[in-house]
């Protein structure tokens, strides 16, 4: 029995289309032009907001994460343009460029944490006194099937344990996505990735499954965290912020999935003007390019820098240099792009998972929970 070979001929063929109209341009050229235009638009708009935060870098413990989130716009736009223009190498650009997604999700989670309290110690103290709300759907349905609050899908009794579970659920995606990207790039170089195949003999289907599970867990935990603290941080308008993040991730995944389904099922067919390569590759990336321009506009309301501007009459409350971004905000950009805090956050999650979890019931929050109502009448006391 021989190992199946990946038929990558189509994706490496040179695109050959006739003009959309007589004396006009091809569909692929149109996609390249529009993608380049929206790359410039989205990058300029996102750059304005990034520069606004970098120049008025008064609260680094919040703004470094905002800047990281904002960089998602130009990175996605540039990745989409490169995938269209250098279509024969689009797999590599997509794998590497979209690897930024988990770091944007983790940055948004950390931003919400910083709204609660600037330092991790204060955040932990806050959640020690929090009564966790029950998990959102579908876990409540699973609870009914597995012993409710005594089963494996119970909610933690301690707010601090709940916080640590959410922490791990979000940051695991950074670690897993990075490893999967390295594996995928290596597999593609050996013709073992095979993006257009669902054959389990190739890496693509397995990486897709693992990645889908990891991102689902991360987004689920992020939504659960938002529901828990949305009232406490209402002044920061968290709904608009989480909407910006969810729309980018939701659309970039599902529209590509729908187009792939339509082409594979024969609903969309290749023609002399639009070949299958452009349906599967250029069109989804063009849509992402256009959407990034629209999201860049939305980010002006979602992540404004005006609240971080220090008024002249309040300067007496600060030192001689109230902004910490340095000349033209360069220091702020370097601070935002320093990934060391993400490394420490992943290490903290792993440490709790393998050691701190065993000692969690010794935390004072478990003593506090004995004297607090479970929040669900008619049910037995919650267990850890």
Image (cartoon, rainbow, N blue to C red):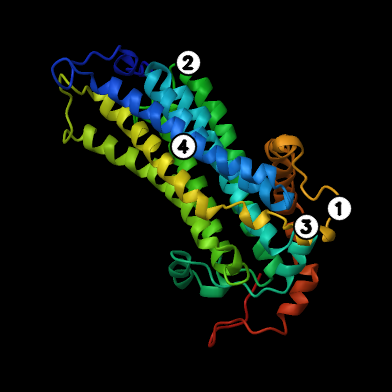
Circle 1 is placed at which residue position? 319
Badge 2, how many Cα within 10 Å: few under 14, some, many 20+?
few
Tell me if 133 is positioned left or right of 118 in this view: left
Can the viewer see residue 71? no
Q: Mark 3 points at which residue?
A: 119
Q: Which of marks 3 and 2 is nearer the N terminus?
A: 3
Residue mark closest to the camera, 3 vs 2: 3
Mark 2, residue position: 190
Question: Residue 48: x and y, percent?
Answer: 56, 40
User: Is residue 161 in view?
Assistant: yes
Farthest residue toward the right? 319
Which of the marked residues, 4 or 1, is nearer the chain's N terminus?
Answer: 4
- The number of callouts visible is 4
Specify which label sits upstream in the sequence, 1 or 3.
3
Q: Is residue 295 positioned above or below 180 on the image?
A: below
The image quadrant of residue 150 is bottom right
Give x and y (percent) for residue 56: 69, 47
Check if mark 4's residue and mark 1's residue have beta carbons within 8 Å.
Answer: no
Mark 3: secondary structure? loop
Query: Residue 312 sits in which quadrant?
Result: bottom right
What separation in Å lies between label 4 and label 2 (alpha carbons)? 35 Å
Which residue occupies the extreme left position in the image? 22
Q: In which quarter of the image is residue 145?
A: bottom left
Mark 4 or mark 2, earlier in chain: 4
Which secondary structure, mark 2? loop
Q: Nearer the viewer, residue 86 or 364?
A: 86
Callout 1 crowding tier (Cα within 10 Å): few <14, some 14–19, many ≥20: few
Q: Is residue 360 left or right of residue 16?
A: right
Give the Cα distance between marks 3 and 2: 45 Å
Q: Name the residue under label 4.
A: 42
């Amino acid at each position: 029995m021989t190992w199946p070979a990946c038929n990558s001929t189509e994706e490496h063929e040179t695109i050959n289309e006739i003009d959309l109209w007589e004396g006009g341009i091809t569909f692929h050229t149109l996609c390249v032009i529009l993608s380049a235009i929206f790359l410039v638009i989205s990058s300029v708009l996102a750059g304005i907001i990034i520069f606004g935060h970098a120049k008025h870098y008064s609260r680094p413990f919040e703004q470094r994460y905002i800047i990281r989130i904002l960089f998602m716009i130009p990175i996605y736009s540039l990745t989409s343009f490169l995938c269209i223009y250098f279509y024969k190498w689009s797999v590599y650009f997509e794998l590497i460029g979209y690897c930024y997604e988990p770091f944007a999700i983790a940055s948004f989670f950390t931003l919400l944490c910083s709204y609660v309290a600037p330092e991790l110690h204060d955040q932990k103290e806050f959640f020690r006194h929090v009564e966790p709300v029950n998990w959102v759907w579908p876990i409540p349905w699973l609870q009914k099937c597995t012993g409710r609050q005594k089963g494996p899908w119970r909610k933690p009794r301690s707010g601090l344990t709940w916080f640590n579970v959410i922490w791990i659920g979000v940051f695991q995606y950074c670690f897993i996505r990075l490893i999967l990207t390295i594996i995928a790039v290596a597999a593609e170089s050996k013709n073992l990735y095979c993006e257009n195949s669902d054959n389990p003999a190739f890496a693509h289907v397995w990486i897709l499954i693992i990645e889908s599970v990891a991102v689902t867990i991360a987004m689920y935990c992020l939504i659960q965290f938002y529901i828990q603290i949305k009232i406490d941080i209402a002044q920061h308008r968290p709904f608009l912020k989480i909407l910006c993040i969810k729309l980018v991730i939701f659309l970039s995944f599902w529209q590509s999935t729908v187009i792939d389904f339509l082409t594979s099922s024969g609903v969309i067919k290749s023609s002399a003007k639009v070949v299958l390569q452009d349906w599967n590759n250029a069109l989804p990336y063009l849509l992402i390019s256009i959407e990034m321009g629209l999201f860049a506009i939305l980010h002006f309301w979602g992540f404004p820098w005006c609240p971080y501007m220090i008024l002249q009459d309040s300067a007496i409350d600060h030192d001689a240099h109230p902004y910490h971004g340095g000349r033209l905000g360069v220091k702020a950009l370097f601070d935002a792009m320093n990934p060391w805090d993400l490394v420490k956050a992943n290490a903290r999650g792993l440490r709790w998972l393998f050691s701190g979890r065993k000692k969690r019931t010794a935390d004072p929050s478990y003593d506090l929970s004995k004297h607090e109502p479970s929040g669900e009448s008619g049910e037995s006391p919650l267990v850890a």
